[in-house]
Structure formats: C-alpha cells, structure tokens
Amino acid sequence: TTPSTAQVIATAFSLDPVPRFFHLLVHVKSLISSYGPYTTYAGTTVFTRAPIPRSTKKSKPPSDFTLATSFAAAQDSVKSAQPDSPSKQDLQAFSLLWTATREVMEKITADGSLSQEVFGWGIIGLSAGYTPALSSPLFANKKNRSFESLKGRLHAALTALPSLNAVRPSEFQNVKAAAGLGVSPADKLNIQVKAWRETHICAQILLQRFKMEGWEGIRWGHGIMVVERWLMHLGLDNKVMEKKEVKGVED
C-alpha cells in the first residue's frame, strides 16, 4: 500500500539527511506522476494539482518538463498562505524535500568527497538554475557580470579536462590538430594543470556565493537533480540506501 503524504512526512523527521532526501524524493515523484504537472492558479501563488490527473496505470515516469514545472510551481508558492486542500499537504512534502536537499548539499560540499570534475559539473548545473538575489541596481549588473564570467570560465576549464569516461580533446588540442600540429606531453600536462586550478577556483567561488545566499537563488529542480547525481557518484543511490535501512532493521 502506498503511504499517504502525512505518513511520509512523519517518517521523514526520523531519518538522517541522505535517506530523508531519497524518502521524500520517491514520494514527491510519485505525487507528480499521479497529479502533475503541478502549477499555480493564474495570477496567484496558490499551488494546485493538474485539473486532469495523470493516468496511474501508466508506468512511464513523468517527463523532465513535468518535474521541472512542478518544482518551479512549488518553489514559487512555498512562502505564500495556501487554502486547505490536498495540494497544500503535497506542498509540505515538496518543501521538506528542498530542505533535505540543502542539508545534503551542505554535507557533500563540506566533506569534499567528490572528484573535482563531478563537483565542477554539479556547480554548472546549479548555476544553470540560479536566480540572483535582488540587490541595489548600482551593484546588480556588476554582480551578474561577475557571475556569468565565473560560470563561463568554469565551463571552459571543465571542457579542457579529460572527460569522465574517455579522453576529450581540449580546444587547444583541436586548434593544433586543425593546423596539422601535434600536442606534446608537456603541452597536455600544462593544459590540464591550468584547467584543474581554474575549475577549483571558479567552482569554489560560485559555491561560496550560493552558500552565502542560503541556496535561495537555486531553482529547486536543478538543486534536486544535482544532489541526486552527486549521491550516485558517491555510491549512494536510493537502492543502496534502502538496503542499508533493511540491514539496520535486521541488525
């Protein structure tokens, strides 16, 4: 029997951040699969289920668009008073999932267990869903230019690194190849050292900006997706966490 949202929320408070994240993520995706895409009533921040529920007979999971639309609606509604309705309780689950997501992001980035490349691409993912905090018009443009510059430098540095699964030629290598020139081992080493350093500097500066703002500028859908990917790279996907929970009960 599928647990109710109230039961899921009650259980969530007894779990550590990582299992709580997966516990809530599974349930929220189930809600979106059944009632999504969630939206807001026109001209309001009242969170609501889709007028026509999705067929629960379909085994196909919700699309990325349906997930993104639902998380965006939840984020835009969470600070507004909501009328009593099933959607109001659904919104509680979305909100708790985001709280767990932030806690896991804090833990992962503090532990420093991710490889530099996986960490850097995650920061790119968070940056793609970043909305700058409101600030004085005198400083807003400068801050935005600085942010876009850092994001561009980080992306360039990451694409200069060997890929996670194969050797990806850098832009420098492509230019030399087009000119009919080879790339010496010394050139390759120099490129990678510079790329690693640039990746570390830019990713850390962007991370500190996100943290200083309490992760408020990150769109929920982007943050949740990045945390899910980071945990997979750390060998902590939902199936692994379920096995650990079962083992804990047996012990």
Image (cartoon, rainbow, N blue to C red):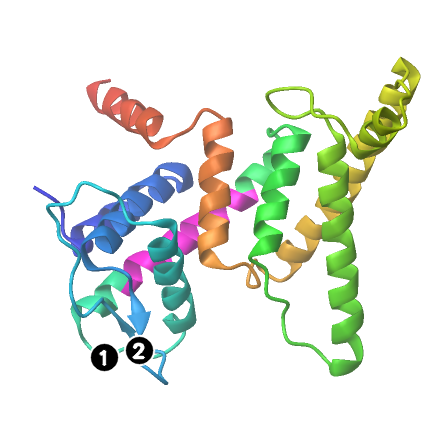
Q: In the rendered view, tell whether residue 220 sits above or below residue 25.
A: below
Q: Position of residue 43 (x, y in %)?
A: 37, 85
Which quadrant would the C terminus be assigned to in this image?
top left
Is residue 100 shown in magenta?
yes
Task: Tell me the distance, in whole angstroms, between the alpha carbons under discs 2 and 1.
Answer: 8 Å
The N terminus is located in which quarter?
Answer: top left
Residue at coordinates 80% horizontally, 81% vertically from top-left?
A: 138
Q: What crowding class fits label 1: few (fewer than 14 Cα within 10 Å), some (14-19), or many (20 or more)?
A: few
The answer to whether 133 is drawn above or below residue 246 in the figure is below
Q: Give above or below for 193 relative to 95.
A: above
Dividing the picture into quadrants, the one containing residue 51 is: bottom left
In the rendered view, does 213 fall on the left or right side of 22? right
In the picture of the structure, the residue carrying the numbered disc 1 is 83
Q: What is the three-letter code of the residue carrying label 1?
A: Pro
Q: Quadrant of residue 86?
A: bottom left
Marks 2/1 in contact by CB < 8 Å: the verdict is yes
Which amino acid, mark 2? Val
Residue 138, disc = none
Q: Nearer the viewer, residue 191 or 10?
A: 191
Front tag of 2 and 1: 2
The boundaries of the magenta stretch are 91-106
Q: Is residue 208 magenta?
A: no
How far across and down, in percent of the image, does residue 76 sit? 42, 71
How many labels sit on residues?
Answer: 2
Q: Position of residue 187 (x, y in %)?
A: 91, 21
Residue shown at 67% from the left, 49% from the top: 207
Q: Which residue is mark 2?
A: 46
Upstream in the sequence, badge 2 or badge 1?
A: 2
